[in-house]
Image (spheres, rainbow, N blue to C red):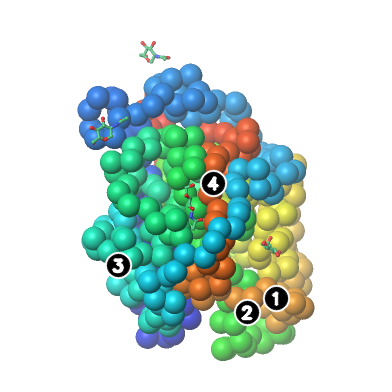
């Protein structure tokens, strides 16, 4: 299971399926996340893993797997302005052409597949591009895909990787999630191993994001919205937050705790009140959402360009204004439709944000401005993506057969030279300990 592929056009009859998979995905994400946390909190290097573990090289030892650099509460997030890692972390060169097995076909072996991953037919539109879980076929593969999160060797060990490695074969690193969720893995030991990266970050070789602006507009064009619609009219409620990860080290909790002092925030999910919607009832969820003016699309982790389905699916696909906490404002501006969100960084404090929301609540015209993007697509929208697995295929067809690339410092590429791509987390003791959880009831 994996994040739903947002680029496949949704159709009405798929809505239920899409919702189910979204739920399953969110559930799995929580599970993976909690597994990671639990694992991390309890791990003993000699027990529970076949891979061993190198001492984490950027912290004080087993007790502090997370970097302790900031203290909560923290309302401002600032990143290094250089969020554009340069090629110093990888090398690109050309070699003499190696004859491909079949020039008009591409084969990708998924090395550490699971029963649910990859999906059954990863790229239905390109039958000339074959994905297989059969490790025996690795000799003929044009690329090998490695899912770099759950179950991934914590330290590079060649016994876990293919024995043969043709020079023209690309090894692709697909971490799925943001650097905080791969923090257990000693990526420094993976220098010189992978040729391509396949992540949500725009400087990846292959892009795998949760949403795409052009796709968003394509969907809207199927049922064009009325430019004069009064979105405020039908709404009776103010701020909604659906949340299931209740750990107070996540900086969004301190933000919401403060915000709640100044404006009513309805909190549903594991950390708040029980939702009246049955778990898999997307329609109920959407109807409930539509009663609200604002949705807290707060990311679990604050990392550069890390904008997930909380923004794209829960907010933009619905008639609700997302309030975002996560990637810097500039990232949202580059990826999202113009003026489609409210960023917490625009306010000096949660109180200021609360005042602004109250103001919008009283000014329908101003509020409706946050939906103007729906009927005003920007000029020169970027090319749309075809679904993340098709992007792998396209990249394989597109790349010159002589081109070689390798990430000699995957760790720094992924987390930043000084770990600046994600906001540091605070961690003291066990996540599972009730002391570290927050519940709003
Ligand atoms: C880890 O925590 C234990 C128990 O609190 C303590 O005895 C030990 O010194 C700590 N180790 C480090 C490296 O901080
Ligand atoms: C690599 O894995 C093999 C098999 O699991 C193990 O025997 C070996 O000790 C590992 N090597 C290192 C350096 O961890
Ligand atoms: C939970 O529901 C109760 C009763 O409706 C309400 O008073 C309370 O504010 C709600 N809590 C949150 C965090 O939404
Ligand atoms: C992503 O990177 C490409 C260049 O590789 C650039 O043209 C594009 O503007 C970037 N997109 C965003 C949203 O930053
Ligand atoms: C991938 O990286 C390996 C290890 O550095 C290298 O030998 C190989 O030529 C690279 N392959 C491609 C297709 O870039």
The reply, left or right, for residue 429 in relation to residue 60 is left
- Occupied quadrant, residue 12: bottom left
- Front position in the image: 308 or 8: 8
Position of the N terminus, as image quadrant, is: bottom left
- Relative to residue 291, is residue 182 depicted above or below? above
State which tag comes first along the sequence, 1 or 2.
Answer: 2
Check disc 4 and report the residue beneath it.
Answer: 407
CB under 8 Å between discs 4 and 3: no
Check disc 1 and report the residue beneath it.
Answer: 381
The reply, left or right, for residue 28 in relation to residue 84 is left
State which tag comes first along the sequence, 1 or 3.
Answer: 3
Task: Name the outermost residue toward the front.
Answer: 96
The reply, left or right, for residue 6 in relation to residue 71 is left
Question: What is the spatial separation of the Cα atoms under label 3 and label 2, in whole angstroms?
Answer: 33 Å
Q: Is mark 3 within 8 Å of ligand 5?
A: no
- Relative to residue 268, is residue 214 depicted above or below? below
Which of labels 1 and 2 is toward the front? 1
CB under 8 Å between discs 1 and 2: yes
Check disc 3 and report the residue beneath it.
Answer: 132
Residue 246 in view of the camera: yes
* Callout 2: SS: helix
- Occupied quadrant, residue 416: top right
The residue carrying pointer 1 sits among few (fewer than 14), some (14 to 19) or many (20 or more) residues within 10 Å by Cα, namely few
State which tag comes first along the sequence, 3 or 2.
Answer: 3
């Amino acid at each position: 299971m994996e994040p739903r592929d947002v680029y496949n056009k949704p159709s009405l009859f798929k809505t239920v399926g899409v919702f189910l998979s979204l739920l399953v995905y969110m559930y799995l994400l929580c599970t993976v996340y909690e597994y990671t946390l639990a694992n991390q909190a309890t791990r003993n290097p000699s027990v529970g893993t076949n891979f061993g573990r190198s001492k984490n090289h950027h912290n004080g030892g087993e007790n502090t797997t997370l970097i302790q650099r900031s203290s909560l509460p923290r309302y401002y997030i600032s990143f290094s302005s250089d969020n554009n890692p340069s090629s110093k972390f990888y090398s690109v060169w050309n070699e003499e052409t190696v004859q491909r097995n079949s020039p008009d076909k591409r084969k990708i072996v998924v090395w550490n597949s699971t029963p649910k991953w990859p999906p059954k037919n990863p790229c239905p539109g390109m039958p000339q591009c074959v994905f297989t879980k059969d490790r025996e076929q690795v000799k003929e593969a044009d690329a090998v895909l490695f899912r770099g999160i759950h179950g991934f060797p914590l330290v590079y060990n060649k016994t876990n990787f293919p024995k043969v490695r043709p020079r023209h074969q690309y090894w692709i690193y697909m971490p799925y999630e943001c650097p905080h969720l791969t923090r257990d893995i000693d990526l420094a030991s993976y220098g010189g191993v992978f040729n391509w990266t396949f992540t949500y970050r725009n400087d990846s070789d292959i892009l795998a994001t949760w949403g795409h602006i052009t796709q968003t507009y394509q969907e809207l064009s199927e049922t064009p919205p009325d430019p004069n619609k009064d979105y405020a009219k039908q709404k009776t409620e103010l701020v909604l937050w659906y949340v299931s990860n209740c750990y107070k080290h996540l900086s969004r909790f301190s933000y919401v705790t403060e915000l709640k002092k100044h404006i009513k925030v309805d909190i549903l999910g594991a950390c708040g009140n029980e939702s009246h919607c049955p778990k898999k009832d997307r329609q109920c969820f959407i109807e409930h959402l539509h009663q609200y003016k604002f949705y807290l699309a707060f990311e679990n982790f604050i990392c550069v360009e890390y904008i997930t389905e909380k923004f794209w699916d829960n907010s933009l696909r619905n008639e609700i204004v997302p309030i975002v906490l996560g990637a810097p404002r500039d990232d949202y501006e580059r990826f999202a439709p113009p003026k489609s969100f409210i960023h917490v960084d625009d306010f000096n404090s949660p109180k200021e944000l609360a005042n602004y929301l109250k103001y919008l609540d009283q000014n329908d015209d101003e509020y409706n401005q946050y939906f103007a993007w729906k009927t005003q697509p920007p000029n020169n929208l970027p090319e749309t993506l075809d679904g993340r697995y098709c992007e792998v295929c396209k990249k394989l067809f597109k790349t010159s057969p002589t081109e070689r690339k390798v990430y000699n410092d995957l760790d720094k590429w992924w987390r930043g030279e000084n770990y600046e791509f994600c906001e540091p987390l605070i961690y003291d003791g066990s996540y599972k300990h009730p002391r570290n959880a927050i519940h709003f009831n």
